[in-house]
Amino acid sequence: MAAERTLSTARDRRATVVSSAIETFARGGFHGVTIAAVAERAGISPAYVSKLFSSKTRLFTAALDECHRRIVDTMERGAEAAEDTSPEAVLHAMGDAYAALIADRDLLALQVKAQAAMAEPEIAEAVRRGTAEIATFAATRSRADGAAVQRFMAYGQLCHLLTTIDAFEIDAPWAAMLTEGIRHSPPEGGERS
């Protein structure tokens, strides 16, 4: 019984550290954050975090892997909620679910910070792995052809850019042109547009 409790506690602490890493790295980036900063956010000693993750890179990639897992889980919930089961409708529902997910900007910011840190081979591999997982899931779950999945992924990257630069809040012709018809969720606490 004590061994189960210890494993559960270790698993819980690991999940707490990974969630704290998502938040901390989303704000400070890979190079700007220390293990100590993540540990402080998690309320756990830096030594324990280092015991769970042998390096800052491993901690960052664990956070990124969790980010990708949350995206795929959200896309699945979107697909399940789709009233129309055509490939286009399922992709649309997945996109809507993802737009709501990134109302908490940490997952979006972590993805942007990961792309900026791809000079680190382990991070580059985690970005590729996550992109492959998301694209493969979108294709398999929606039954869409390659061109439709390519548009879905490209549209998602445009949404990332527009959300990152707050284009939905800019009153200018270029912003209106680029945001026309794009669904998004404002930062948590704001109104949905």
Image (spheres, rainbow, N blue to C red):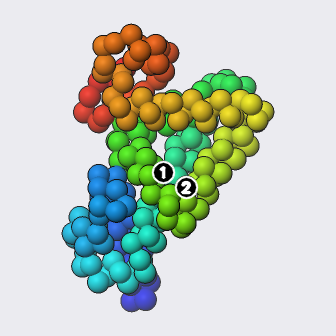
- Does residue 40 lie above or below 51 as drawn? above
Disc 2 is placed on an element classified as helix
Q: Give how far across and how far down residue 56 sits, in percent.
A: 39, 72
Q: Give how far across and how far down residue 155 sits, in percent.
A: 57, 29
Q: Residue at (29%, 64%) from the top-left corner? A: 33
Q: Give how far across and how far down residue 24 sits, in percent.
A: 29, 58
Q: Which mark is residue 5?
A: none
Q: Residue at (42%, 29%) from the top-left corner? A: 162
Q: Which is more foreground, mark 1 or mark 2? A: 1
Q: Is residue 119 left or right of residue 134?
A: left
Q: Amino acid at mark 1?
A: Gln
Cα distance in 3D space between marks 1 and 2: 7 Å
Tell me the quarter of the image containing the N terminus. bottom left
Disc 1 is placed on an element classified as helix
Q: Which mark is residue 127?
A: 2
Q: Amino acid at mark 2?
A: Val
Q: Dot 2 surroundings within 10 Å: few (below 14), some, or many (20 or more)?
A: many
Q: Which residue is mark 1?
A: 115
Q: Dot 1 surroundings within 10 Å: few (below 14), some, or many (20 or more)?
A: some
Q: Is residue 162 left or right of residue 20?
A: right
Q: Residue at (55%, 55%) from the top-left corner? A: 127
Task: Give 36 or 3, whichever is nearer the viewer.
Answer: 36
Q: Is residue 37 left or right of residue 182?
A: left
Whether residue 31 is visible to the viewer of this picture, yes or no, is yes
Q: Residue at (34%, 52%) from the top-left corner? A: 26
Whether residue 93 is visible to the viewer of this picture, yes or no, is no
Task: Give 161 or 64, whichever is nearer the viewer.
Answer: 161
Mark 1 in CB contact with mark 2 (< 8 angstroms): yes
Tell me the quarter of the image containing the C terminus. top left
Q: Give how far across and how far down residue 60 sits, in percent.
A: 42, 64
- Does residue 43 lie above or below 171 as drawn? below
Q: Quadrant of residue 186?
A: top left
